[in-house]
Image (tube, helix red, strand yellow):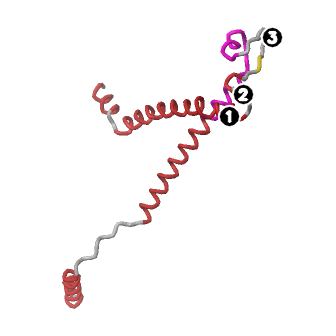
Amino acid sequence: MLKEFREFALKGNVVDLAIGVIIGAAFGAIVSSMVDDIIMPIVGAITGGLDFSNYFLPLASEVTANSLEEARRQGAVLAWGNFLTIALKFVIIAWVLFMVVKAMNRLKRQQEKAPETAPEPPADVKLLTEIRDLLRSRSV
């Protein structure tokens, strides 16, 4: 059983999947930083200093806090600003992955369009091939 597990775990697809998950997590962290540290501050500056990550709607009467973190400790809140930020991260990740797949498909189509052809043989080889073919056709 241990041998079967080792064979399964070391198959190419499993290792490729593991690498994909690790790279995906790192890519997610980069996108999170880009949205939180670059895009949302720019959006906030354009909209007059709005910070979407702290926008929430209190669902309980005891919620009186001004920050989302503190409001969550006081009771139920609808954190629509946080949701907006996460949705923006998703759109960016989806767009980048779409562009990667699009580029890969374009390369694949180019490879399919250009069939591999053998280089043309030298003139003497071509002549000998023609003579051989002529002799074969006469002997039939």
- Amino acid type at circle 1 is Val
Mark before the other along the chain sequence, 2 or 1: 1
Indicate whether residue 103 is drawn in magenta: no
SS for tag 3? Answer: loop
Most common SS among magenta residues: helix
Mark before the other along the chain sequence, 1 or 3: 1
Residue 3, given in percent of the width and then of the height, sits at: 27, 28
Residue 43 disc label = 1
SS for tag 2? Answer: loop
| Residue at the (68%, 14%) spot, across then down | 72
- Amino acid type at circle 3 is Ser
Quadrant showing the C terminus: bottom left
Q: Are marks 2 and 3 in contact (CB under 8 Å)?
A: no
Residue 109 disc label = none
The magenta region covers: 67-89
Mark 2–mark 3 Cα distance, whole angstroms, equals 24 Å
Residue 102 in the figure: left or right of residue 82 = left
Q: Are marks 2 and 1 in contact (CB under 8 Å)?
A: yes
Residue 119, given in percent of the width and then of the height, sits at: 28, 72
Residue 77, given in percent of the width and then of the height, sits at: 73, 17
Give the residue pinned by disc 3: 61
Q: Is residue 71 above or below residue 35?
A: above
Residue 109 in the figure: left or right of residue 77 = left
At label 1, counting other C-alpha atoms closer than 10 Å, the crowd grade (few under 14, some 14-19, many 20 or more) is some
**Foreground residue among 55 and 138:** 55
Give the residue pinned by disc 2: 50
Mark 1–mark 3 Cα distance, whole angstroms, equals 31 Å
At label 3, counting other C-alpha atoms closer than 10 Å, the crowd grade (few under 14, some 14-19, many 20 or more) is few
- Amino acid type at circle 2 is Leu
